Image (cartoon, grey):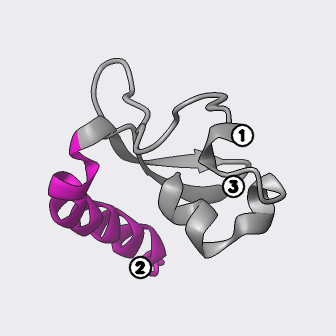
Amino acid sequence: MQRCVDLCPSLTNGKGVEALDVVRHGVGLRPMREGGPRVERERIDGVNVVHNYGHGGYGYQASFGSAQAAEELASTALKPKAKL
């Protein structure tokens, strides 16, 4: 907070860091899906949708693997269907 006030004193109208109030902390919170992450394809109103969410705090660590899985699902959905 001090660095912010030093950078931009108008935040507190020149009253210093003591004039600031912490309303809430909400930094770095990542939603965790009950039952684990959802990485799957679903057809909604005739449109293929690939879901990839709910990783919680380990989303960065899981991002490469889950992104690859989502990409494979999307690629499969976009492949042309054989017409016999």
Residue 39, percent across and down?
34, 46
The Cα–Cα distance between marks 2 and 1, rounded to whole angstroms, is 59 Å
The residue carrying pointer 1 sits among few (fewer than 14), some (14 to 19) or many (20 or more) residues within 10 Å by Cα, namely: few
Q: Which residue is mark 3?
A: 46
In the rendered structure, which disc, 2 or 1, sits on the residue that comes first in sequence? 1
Q: Secondary structure at mark 1?
A: helix
The part of the chain drawn in magenta is 58-84
Residue 73 lies, with reference to residue 17, above or below; the image says below
Q: Which residue is mark 1?
A: 19
Between the residue at mark 3 and the residue at mark 2, the CA separation in whole angstroms equals: 15 Å
- Frontmost residue, 24 versus 29: 24
Amino acid at pointer 2: Lys
Mark 3 Cα-neighbour bin, 10 Å: few <14, some 14–19, many ≥20? few
Q: Amino acid at mark 1?
A: Ala
- Name the residue at 46% across, 43% down: 27
Kindly indicate the quadrant of the structure image that contains residue 38: top left
